[in-house]
Image: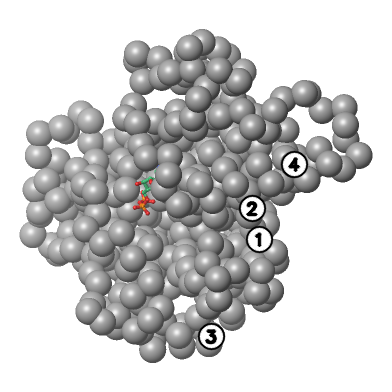
Amino acid sequence: MRCPGSTPGLATQDIHTRRGGKRDEELILPINSSLSVTLHQDQLKTTTTAVISKDFTEDRIWLNGREEDIGQPRIQACLREIRRLARKRRSGDEEDLLPLSLNYKVHIASVNNFPTAAGLASSASGYACLAYALAQVYGVKSDLSEVARRGSGSACRSLYGGFVEWQMGEQADGKDSVARQVAPESHWPELRVLILVVSAEKKLTGSTVGMQTSVETSPLLRFRAEAVVPARMAEMIRYVKERNFQGFGQLTMKDSNQFHATCLDTFPPISYLNDTSRHIIHLVHRFNAHHGQTKVAYTFDAGPNAVIFTLDDTVAEFVAAVRHSFPPESNGDKFLKGLPVKPAPLSDELKAALGMDPTPGGIKYIIATQVGPGPQILDHPHAHLLGPDGLPKPTV
Ligand code: ADP
């Protein structure tokens, strides 16, 4: 099973709140709706294998080759939810299902081909893939938004491909807090995404803890969720549908900036951006000012790494500007990963307009990608991460 990474287009910082009362303790419900762009699995992906067997004595999970604690509440919530759905389906009128036992234990192995827990949304990709793989194993055919959401809120947006909205919903039980596709992967073929990896290190403030503190202490966040995001969601969906890059790019940047303003408004404050992130912000604005229009846009999630949106005709020049401003230290040939980008000359006028002292090594590498599809089933046995004994294959 392969699942895509996803990246925020708007308001993607999923602020989860646990609504009071015991019944709701496990629900991950956002305080605002959000929209994300599904990244292409040819460049960023999670691969997950799940197997059930009467021979297994306990549920187990391996992540990136290392066994993890299966007792983690979010993994448990996903397992419980998928088994509940499987039970419901079988107690319905579909008795022709395979006679698999819901009491069998499950083994799960998963790998991300990009840094885990570094602010590149591995949790979204990982839990979407987990939900999808478990649904295959347990024969669940219903919508998986809720299963994925129980793992990581943003994971519900990684199940459909293309441009996806997570509607916050109104019901206390969260049943209407679901994701839906706004436009398919093929909708905007010229759109490109560049991930500027500033740090692949594990982040200091986990997103969930950080967001919880923001919800509790930031009045700006409350204002943003109630008064700003609803109108922006409608506006953003319109820009996507119209393929209006000017509108899409500007709103994406404004929304990223406002999210990071709420981080500063949190008490004690949270800062996900670092000096390099701020340099990237200046670079983008100067690049756009030089061209007299919004040709590139940035958004930052809960980490210092930038996600850049642009169109295919601008990629080469912008990458040249990044190389100029952040000369690669030692990995010149490995600086650019993913989609090929032709070398482009940088005019003296643009160099002068960027007007920044170069910061060697500020950006570790760039991943060039585009909009991609939702989860894919990998039929080939070679692709499976677990061997016939139910343990990770040695290469994993
Ligand atoms: P990120 O910015 O990468 O989403 P988080 O700290 O929010 O960082 O989430 C990382 C956590 O998500 C991991 O510690 C792990 O618990 C979970 N996770 C990441 N990848 C996977 C995966 N492939 N399968 C299951 N869980 C995963």
- What residue did someone put label 2 on? 145
Give the mark, 4 or 2, whose residue is nearer the N terminus: 4
Amino acid type, label 3: Glu
Seen at 51% across and 58% down, the residue is 153
* On-image quarter of the C terminus: top left
Q: CA distance from mark 4 to mark 2?
A: 18 Å
* Label drawn at residue 87: 4
Disc 3 and disc 2: Cα gap in Å? 23 Å
C-alpha separation, residue under disc 4 versus residue under disc 1 = 21 Å
Q: Position of residue 66 (x, y in %)?
A: 32, 30
- Kind of residue at disc 1: Val
Crowd rating for badge 2 (residues with CA inside 10 Å; few <14, some 14–19, many 20+): many
Instruction: Return the disc, 4 or 1, that comes first in the chain's sequence.
Output: 4
Q: Earlier in the sequence, mark 3 or mark 4?
A: 4
Instruction: Write down the residue under mark 3.
Output: 226
Q: Are marks 2 and 1 in contact (CB under 8 Å)?
A: yes
Give the camera-side residue of 318 and 352: 318
Asked if 181 appears above or below 177 in the picture, the reply is above
Residue 67: horizontal and vertical position, in percent? Answer: 34, 31
